[in-house]
Image (tube, rainbow, N blue to C red):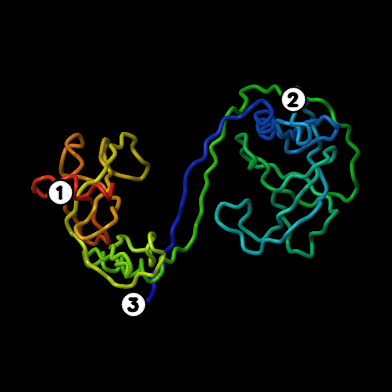
Amino acid sequence: MSEVLTAPLVVEFPFTRSLGPVQSAFLTGLRERTVLGVRARDGRVVVPPVEYDPVTADELRDLVEVAPTGTVTTWAWNPSPRRGQPLDTPFAWALVRFDGADTALLHALDAPDPDAVHTGMRVRVRWAAERTGAITDIACFEPADSEVTERQVRPYSGEFAEPVTGITAPARLDYTYAPGRTQSRYLQALAERKTVGERCPACRKVYVPPRGACPTCGVATGEPVEVGPRGTVTTYCIVNIKARNLDIEVPYVYAHIALDGADLALHARIGGIPYDQVRMGLRVEPVWTDGARHPDHYRPTGEPDADYDSYKELI
C-alpha cells in the first residue's frame, strides 16, 4: 500500500448574532471613534463591556466613555501573521487597559520588533479608515507618549443614530487531515471505484468505512473486504434547505445505504429518482463522475425492493 494520505481541509462558516443594548453601543461607538465601557456594581469600569456583572450577575447598563489611549499589561510577539489577522507584518498581541478602565482588551499592537514592546508601555488606538461597527474598527494599537494622561471617565447614554444591532463574524479553521492507514486504504480503493471495508476477526462483521477497530468487540480489524457496489436504502431524509457552495437543487435526499456484504450503513445522496419516491428497502448503485474520488450519488438499480428483515439490523 502507498503511504498514508494527508489533505488540507478548511471548515468555514459565518457566525451571525444579534446584539443587546450594551454590545450594540460598544460597537456603534467604535464606528464613531468612541471607546465605551460599562460600570460594574463594585465601581470598576469594564472594557470591553459586558451585559452582566462578572461577580453578581446583575444586568449592567451604566455605560461610560474612556480614553482611546492605554497601557500594555501583557503581550506576546507574533512573528508570522496568518490570513485574516489585523496586520500582515509581524506584530504583538497585547492586552491593553484603556485610561479610565479597570480591565484590558486584547488586540494587535503595531511595533517594529519585540524589543520595541514592553509591559507598561503607552499605546493609543489607530482607527481604521473605514469603520462599520466592529472590533476591526480598531485597526490596531500603536506606541504613544510615555506620560499617562489623566482623563475623567464620563457617563455616556449609548444612543447613536443608526445603531449596529447585529454582526456576522466569519469563523474559519485550516488544518491538515491525516486519515491513517485504514482509511487511506479505503480512500485509495474509492479512487479505483471500489469500496473496501474491514472484517472483525471476532464477530466477523464488515465495517464500511473502516475505522481500524471493531466498535462492538474493540479489537483491531485488518482483513480487507470488498463490498457492494450495490446496496439498500435503510433510512433517509429529505433536504429542503439549500447549502452554500453545493450545486444541488432542493429538495433532494440523503440516505443511509447498506452496501451488499457490509454490516454498517454509509451516508450518500440519492439521485435519478424523484425525492418523494425514495423509500426504505430501495436497491441502489453508485454513479461516478470523471475524475471523482468517490461516487457522486446513488441511483435505483431497478431491482425489487429488499425485504425488511434483510436490513432491519442496519437501521
- In 3D space, how far apart are the residues under numbered discs 2 and 3 (Cα atoms)? 62 Å
Helix, strand or loop under label 3: loop
Above/below status of 252 relative to 267: above
**Circle 2: residue type:** Arg
Taking the spot 60% from the left edge, 52% from the top edge, the residue there is: 85
Q: Which residue is mark 2?
A: 61
Mark 2 nearby-residue class (10 Å; few <14, some 14–19, many ≥20): some
**Discs 2/1, front:** 1
N-term mark: 2 or 3:
3
**Circle 1: residue type:** Arg
Helix, strand or loop under label 1: strand
- The numbered mark at residue 283 is 1
Residue 246 left/right relative to 129: left
Q: Which residue is mark 3?
A: 2
N-term mark: 3 or 1:
3
- Location of residue 7 (image quadrant): bottom left
Taking the spot 76% from the left edge, 36% from the top edge, the residue there is: 54
**Discs 2/3, front:** 3
- In 3D space, how far apart are the residues under numbered discs 3 and 1 (Cα atoms)? 34 Å
N-term mark: 2 or 1:
2
Residue 75 left/right relative to 152: left
- Residue 10 is situated, as x and y percent measured from the top left of the image, at 45, 55
Taking the spot 90% from the left edge, 45% from the top edge, the residue there is: 148
- Figure disc tally: 3
Asked if marks 2 and 1 touch (Cβ < 8 Å), the reply is: no
